Image (spheres, grey):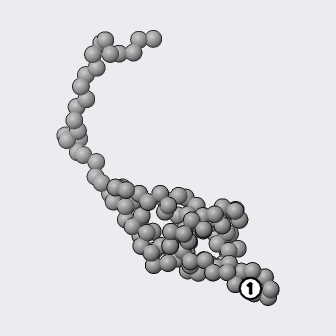
Amino acid sequence: MSINRLVADPGRLTILATLASAGRQEFVALRQTTHLTDGNLASHARRLQTAGLIQIDKQFRNAKPVTSFTLTPQGRQALELHVRQLVAAISVKPPAAGELKAEPAAEAADEWVD
């Protein structure tokens, strides 16, 4: 299993999950929801935008800049794949007690002596 490190980063994963559930978010609302600092949010968002996972729109409203973020279809696919991989990893059933391989007995010479 190969985990996408871009998506697995906690800050970026929080951004992707928030956008997947809440839809389009403005900077201030996304910052409040994710609890990221301005700098962390901006940095993670640029990385996600460069990878094509989110879209960043900058507009002016009442002469003030407003930045909005939207999850792209590629971003949704990457997030869904990440979730499927995590669910598959925790769904693996451990071997039954009789299926466990016995550990070879440690030899006396191999034991740690203090």
Q: Nearer the viewer, residue 89 or 2?
A: 2
- Residue 105 in the image: state x and y as whole percent: 25, 22
Q: Position of residue 29 (x, y in %)?
A: 67, 75
Element type where label 1 sits in the image: strand
Give the amino acid at mark 1: Phe
Number of marks present in the image shown: 1
Most distant residue in the bottom direction: 62
Q: Residue at x 56, y 71 (%)?
A: 49
Residue 62 versus residue 18 in the image, above or below: below
- Say which residue appears at 52% left-offset and 77% top-offset: 71
Instruction: Determine which residue is flagged by label 1.
Output: 60
Query: Residue 56, relative to residue 112: is it above or below?
Result: below
- Residue 70 appears in the figure: yes
Q: Quadrant of the N terminus?
A: bottom left
Q: Residue at x 45, y 78 (%)?
A: 73
Task: Residue at 60%, 64% (x, y): give it.
Answer: 44
How many residues crowd around disc 1 within 10 Å: few (fewer than 14), some, or many (20 or more)? few
